[in-house]
Image: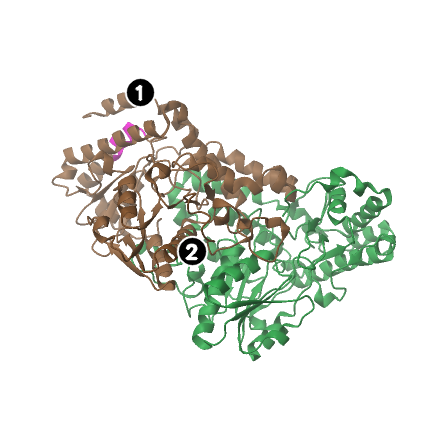
Chain colours: A green, B brown
Amino acid sequence: VTTRAEAERLDAADPLAPLRDLFDLPDRTIYLDGNSLGALPRTTAARVADVVTREWGRDLIGSWNTAGWIDLPRRVGDKIAGLVGAGPGELVVADSTSVNVYKVLKAALAVAAADAPGRRVVVSERANFPTDLYVAQSVAAEHGCELVLLEPGEDPADRLDEEVAVLMLTHVNYRTGRMWDMAAVTAQAHERGVLTVWDLCHSAGAVPVDLTAAGADYAIGCGYKFLNGGPGAPAYVWASPRLAERFWQPLAGWMGHAAPFAFATGYEPAPGIGRFVSGTPAVIGTAALECGVDTVLAAEPYGGMAALREKSLALTRLFADLVSESPLGGPDGFAIESPLADAERGSQVCLTRAEGAYAIVQALIARGVVGDFRAGQDGLPDILRFGVTPLYTRFVDVWDAVEHLRQVMGTGEWREARFDQRLAVT
Amino acid sequence: VTTRAEAERLDAADPLAPLRDLFDLPDRTIYLDGNSLGALPRTTAARVADVVTREWGRDLIGSWNTAGWIDLPRRVGDKIAGLVGAGPGELVVADSTSVNVYKVLKAALAVAAADAPGRRVVVSERANFPTDLYVAQSVAAEHGCELVLLEPGEDPADRLDEEVAVLMLTHVNYRTGRMWDMAAVTAQAHERGVLTVWDLCHSAGAVPVDLTAAGADYAIGCGYKFLNGGPGAPAYVWASPRLAERFWQPLAGWMGHAAPFAFATGYEPAPGIGRFVSGTPAVIGTAALECGVDTVLAAEPYGGMAALREKSLALTRLFADLVSESPLGGPDGFAIESPLADAERGSQVCLTRAEGAYAIVQALIARGVVGDFRAGQDGLPDILRFGVTPLYTRFVDVWDAVEHLRQVMGTGEWREARFDQRLAVT
């Protein structure tokens, strides 16, 4: 692809192109940040309005039964299960990613303590998303365990000795987009007697995931990225059926009780994954999440996750190629931090540059090209991050985004002071 | 009050009557279940629609800054703080009540372990809301502590010996509406070296609360009852400023980090109550909650919480009087389980009856009188529960509700089989 017209032809030939109409996208914006906050599905506003005005406003408390509020964590959970290779009834929507990381780490350590009491190490990776590390740090401290962090490039297998209880990895790294081979890593872990926790925040709805085929033990993920569930959407949690009932998770709220409306004094955990629900479900947020999940399920007639993946790879490959083949990858000093091998790359491309990453991202945003900046830490570089969502990202969007980046560098506008005022961005 | 006309006159003379217009209430419904799910404020639908279509749909990720999403937990927390006698910056909106109970119990036990390591008992009450007990059971088990439950009528002071670390009570009981004297019980606890955790689910927005004056240690509460925040609204958590920074709470998510967007590998808790935030805030739910909290704040020009309390007591007193003075309290066999002394009663009246509590509640609901049923357990009786919300409940609503109850008993319609099919109701 060497001209914009060629990118347009790719869009014209794209069988998934009609799916873009499932979203309300703002004019004059090239949105490459669906890996942080997915775009608004067209159905969400009406669905949320109906939940608010009819289910809540008119039917009030009766909606726990008549509108099925009480079943929301399981019903929407079942839909997500279908996207990550989990069975019906194995996954629930609940709480936030951070809270769910806590639940599964505690559950995994309880299993490890019973099966292999000498194992007192949790392994994760330094480049993992901070909330996973913070919660792991907290849980490890509570249990007198050690948290060991893999350095970039380190093979987990080299660290999984007989002291390790749990390996917790994010399937697709939030910074680089590097994707682990879930089946291979899980098999290595199991060979060494180690349980696995997979964070699917950047995977569900973005890349094919098959928790069952991989033999994974626990998984969690968020609703507001590629699942398009809206800002702060509820998260989800899965435990392998062979493990779900082995212990309580400690956030033993009433909605995880076997009979919440019996108002029994003593806790009795619900069967299976049901016990990973804690408090009253976030009804409005879960209803919005369902609309988002439905946009991914709407790809089924078009080839589903496999077709989305194929398009995602074509989009990210185009982005990487355009950067490499232009002055950007040469005199402008950008390097592609994301893996170039398709099998190792999620649904984003991330770039590094010796200076100006933050300001360059801001200058692009001022032009309507929305990617994001992630600060480097602990030897990791600052990055410019560009996510593609095959449901709505077009090949011309990638072409235009790279063209804008060329112009931002060519004009030097990124050096303007207004682009270097750091704000909190997620 | 012996006629409906007298009740109408009370409404006509009620200075708070205009506040009812803040709500979208369904026709032909007498809603006495705002203690389970508050009614829909008139502003909520438009506010939620704006969050969805403009803040999310149009401005996308930029809304973390431009719409102030990042500040929501603190901004709405400050509003709630004003309703419960907490200072600005001392209370945050986060997660569910169940999850927040876990946080504060863990924090309290960490403080107790440091200050009084021999204390290994958590005291609560058998009649507490189950989720509090379940989480307390879980936390006690994790810490090798014992959970001791007060029986109904038992004085906490009698059980607060030198082995007790924490006393956790719900300020207004969810079943009976019985209200503890927070200041007196907290003082007794402190005299005995015991920390206090107060559940304000049935208090905030319903009765005056002054955490600071009471010298309380920790408090949590939900957003969807008298705060009118909507189904599954986010909850809130408060820690006394003298305790907030003593320890982490263990759900150490990135939004409780001192600098979440630095993406540091190591956890460093935010100052003060900020560390009790865990994951990404539920933006849509928190925006809806803010509309609900604003309905309570709208009473300020009318005398605020004191005026709401006065009306609430008049309403519940009328309800109890009408039941006592009619055949309901005699031949029909109802007993009033809620305290008759104003100082001991929250914003509800609960009734017991030897049989039929569930079916009677259902028969009332079929007539449009929405109270609820709470199953008895462990020696506690089944109850019929009727909440009043002085923002929107009228004196004629109470009159009519009791009249319907008379008719349900007089006709015997509650014995119809259709009223005894138990459904899950919250």
The secondary structure that dominates the magenta segment is helix
Of residue A132 and residue A56, the one placed in the foreground of this image is A132
Residue B398 colored magenta? yes
Name the side, left or right, on which B295 lies relative to A359.
left
Q: Are marks 2 and 1 in contact (CB under 8 Å)?
A: no
Q: Which mark, residue B12?
A: 1
Residue occupying the far front of the picture: B115
Helix, strand, or loop for circle 2? loop
Q: Which residue carries the number 2 mark?
A: A278
Provide residue A227's location: percent of width, then percent of height.
Answer: 60, 54
Q: Which mark, residue B116?
A: none
Quarter of the view holding residue A80 = bottom right
Tell me the quarter of the image containing the N terminus of chain B: top left
* Circle 1 residues within 10 Å: few <14, some 14–19, many ≥20: few
Residue A278 colored magenta? no
Quarter of the view holding residue B37 = top left
- Residue at image position (37%, 55%) is B115
Residue occupying the far left of the picture: B331
Magenta part of the chain: B394-401
